[in-house]
Image (cartoon, helix red, strand yellow):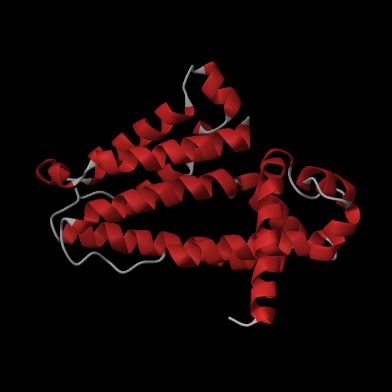
Amino acid sequence: MTHENRTTEKFRQTQDKLILKLMPTVRKSGFQTLRMDDIAKIMDISRATLYKYFPNKEDIFYKVTVGFVQYIKDMTTDLPKEETLYATEFQQLFEQSVSLALFITDDFLKELQNTYPLMYEKLWEAIQFREKQLLIFYNEGIQKGVFNKINGRLLNLQDKMLFSMLDLKYLMKNQWTIEQVLFDFYELRKLQLFKPEMLSTVDDSLIVPRIEYLTQKISNMLL
């Protein structure tokens, strides 16, 4: 890698880290009301440094959206070739669904649609593409005798419940911890999907560190 390429990569990594600091605020309060001064304070940098990495607020929102689109595209994987591999893919998809529910909220999508419709279209296309890929995954699992016969569209709708369940007020009202929500939702999805005779192919010990990581990640976002 040349010096120029290393410098460019370091620049992008710094942009990503700064944007990540902004995401909890965007999730709670939206983006449109934020001023550049507010953003600099949240990122814990000077206004001059902020403009070094982002020429304007629109550029930040654009990079946030592009990052989401790329993240969703990177999720796309080949269908498992063996029945036992469906369990591994299921756990990866579960983790991805939680991450998407954490960041891409309905409020974010509405704000994006109203303010930057072209960016909204790109993100919405990526979301729709992922949902279609999930349907293919579910249908293949049914055909191979791994999954119960269930409408995959209902499972996609269930993913949208995650946003409501990960609301801090909802958790406190129901005396539910983030970790409990994630484990319970994982267990629900597993029992819905896998045929009883295929449940033994799912190694729940593999999901434990992922849920612990997600719990910490979500706690940092919500608290």
- Count of numbered tags: 0
Q: Residue at x 69, y 47 (%)?
A: 21
Task: Indicate the position of residue 60 as horizontal and vertical percent values.
Answer: 75, 60
Q: Nearer the viewer, residue 198 or 113?
A: 198
Percent across and percent down for residue 149 are: 20, 50
User: Depth check: 11 or 34 in front?
Assistant: 11
Q: Quadrant of the C terminus?
A: top right
Outermost residue toward the left in this view: 197
Residue 117 placement, left or right of 39: left
From the viewer's perspective, is residue 144 above or below residue 1? above
Q: Is residue 138 left or right of residue 68?
A: left
- The residue at the far front in this view is 3
The image quadrant of residue 83 is bottom left
- At horizontal 19% and vertical 51% (from top left) the residue drawn is 147
**What is the quadrant of residue 65 in the picture?**
bottom right
Percent coordinates x, y for residue 48 in the rendering: 90, 58
| Residue occupying the far bottom of the picture | 2
Q: Residue at x 44, y 52 (%)?
A: 96
